Image (spheres, helix red, strand yellow):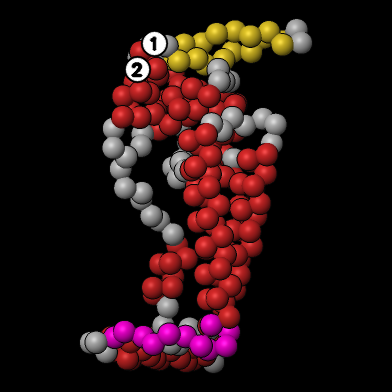
C-alpha cells in the first residue's frame, strides 16, 4: 500500500483539510491499518494535486475559509483501480517479538514480564479506542469497514489473552519446553560469558593503569 493510495482513501471519506488527513493517520487506531509514517504528508498532497488526482476547494465556516482536498475523476478512478488490486502481505515489525526471540537464560525474566505488562496496558487502551471509534459521532465506517473493525477487536482481544498467559508463565516459571537441536543456547551463554569476562579483564587493566598514574 502506497502513501498516495492511503491519502486518496482518506479523502474519499469526505473532502478534508490537511489537518483532517493528518489526524486520521495519527489516530491511535490507525496503526492497526496504516502501519507507515506520514511525515511527508503535505509534499504528497502537493504532488497528487499536480498529477491531477486531487483538487482543492474552499469552504467557509463561521466566517472562516478552509482549503479542502477533494478527489478528481482521475483520483476516483485510481482509487477504484487500487481497490481491485490484490493487497500485499502485511509487513510485520514488532520489537517485542524480536526481544523475545533474542532472550537468553542469563537475562532477568522479570524484565521481560515488565515488557509484556507495558504491551498489555497499551493493547487494552487500543481495544478501548477501537470500541469508542465504532460509537463516536464523527468517523464514517461503512458495513464492509465494520468487518475490518471486528477483525481489529478480535486481534486485540486475542493479544490480551496471550499477554496475560505469557506474563503468568514467565513469573511462575511455567514455560514451555525449548527447542534447541544444535545446543545453541549453551554455546550462546559460553560465548557471552567469555566476551564479558574479557571485557571485565580489560576494565581491571584500565583501572590498574589509572591507579598507577595517580601514584
Where is residue 189? Give x, y as percent. 36, 89
Identify the residue at horizontal 53%, vertical 82% (top origin).
169
Horizontally, residue 1 falls left or right of residue 150, namely: left
Task: Say if residue 5 shows up in the picture.
Answer: yes
Determine the secondary structure under disc 1. Answer: helix
Horizontally, residue 194 falls left or right of residue 136, namely: left
Viewer-side residue, 190 vs 161: 161
Where is residue 167? Give x, y as percent. 57, 77
Whether tag 1 and tag 2 are in contact, CB under 8 A, the answer is yes
Where is residue 98? Give x, y as percent. 40, 67
Question: Height in image: 19 above or below 126?
Answer: above
Identify the residue at horizontal 24%, vertical 87% (top origin).
181
Where is residue 77? Give x, y as percent. 34, 17
Which quarter of the figure has residue 214? bottom right
Identify the residue at horizontal 28%, vertical 37% (top origin).
86
Direction left: furthest residue:
182
Q: Which residue is mark 1?
A: 73
Crowd band around label 2 with a 10 angstrom C-alpha radius: few (<14), some (14–19), many (20+)? few
Q: Which residues are magenta?
A: 169-180
Q: Quadrant of the C terminus?
A: bottom right
Q: Which residue is mark 2?
A: 77
**Majority secondary structure in the magenta region:** loop
Q: Quadrant of the N terminus?
A: top left
Task: Say if residue 210 shows up in the picture.
Answer: no
Amino acid at each position: 500500500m502506497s502513501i498516495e493510495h492511503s491519502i486518496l482513501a482518506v479523502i474519499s471519506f469526505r473532502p478534508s483539510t490537511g489537518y483532517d488527513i493528518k489526524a486520521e493517520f495519527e489516530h491511535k487506531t490507525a496503526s492497526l491499518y496504516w502501519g507507515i509514517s506520514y511525515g511527508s504528508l503535505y509534499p504528497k498532497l502537493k504532488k497528487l494535486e499536480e498529477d491531477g488526482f486531487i483538487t482543492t476547494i474552499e469552504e467557509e465556516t463561521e466566517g472562516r475559509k478552509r482549503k479542502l482536498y477533494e478527489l478528481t475523476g482521475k483520483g476516483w478512478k485510481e482509487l477504484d483501480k487500487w481497490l481491485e488490486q490484490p493487497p500485499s502481505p502485511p509487513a510485520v515489525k514488532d520489537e517485542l517479538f524480536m526481544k523475545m526471540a533474542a532472550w537468553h537464560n542469563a537475562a532477568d525474566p522479570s524484565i521481560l514480564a515488565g515488557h509484556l505488562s507495558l504491551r498489555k496496558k497499551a493493547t487494552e487502551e487500543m481495544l478501548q479506542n477501537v470500541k469508542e471509534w465504532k460509537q463516536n459521532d464523527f468517523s464514517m465506517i461503512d458495513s464492509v469497514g465494520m468487518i475490518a473493525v471486528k477483525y481489529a477487536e478480535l486481534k486485540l482481544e486475542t493479544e490480551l489473552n496471550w499477554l496475560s498467559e505469557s506474563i503468568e508463565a514467565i513469573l511462575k516459571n511455567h514455560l514451555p519446553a525449548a527447542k534447541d537441536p544444535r545446543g545453541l543456547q549453551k554455546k550462546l551463554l559460553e560465548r557471552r560469558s567469555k566476551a564479558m569476562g574479557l571485557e571485565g579483564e580489560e576494565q581491571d587493566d584500565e583501572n590498574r593503569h589509572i591507579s598507577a598514574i595517580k601514584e
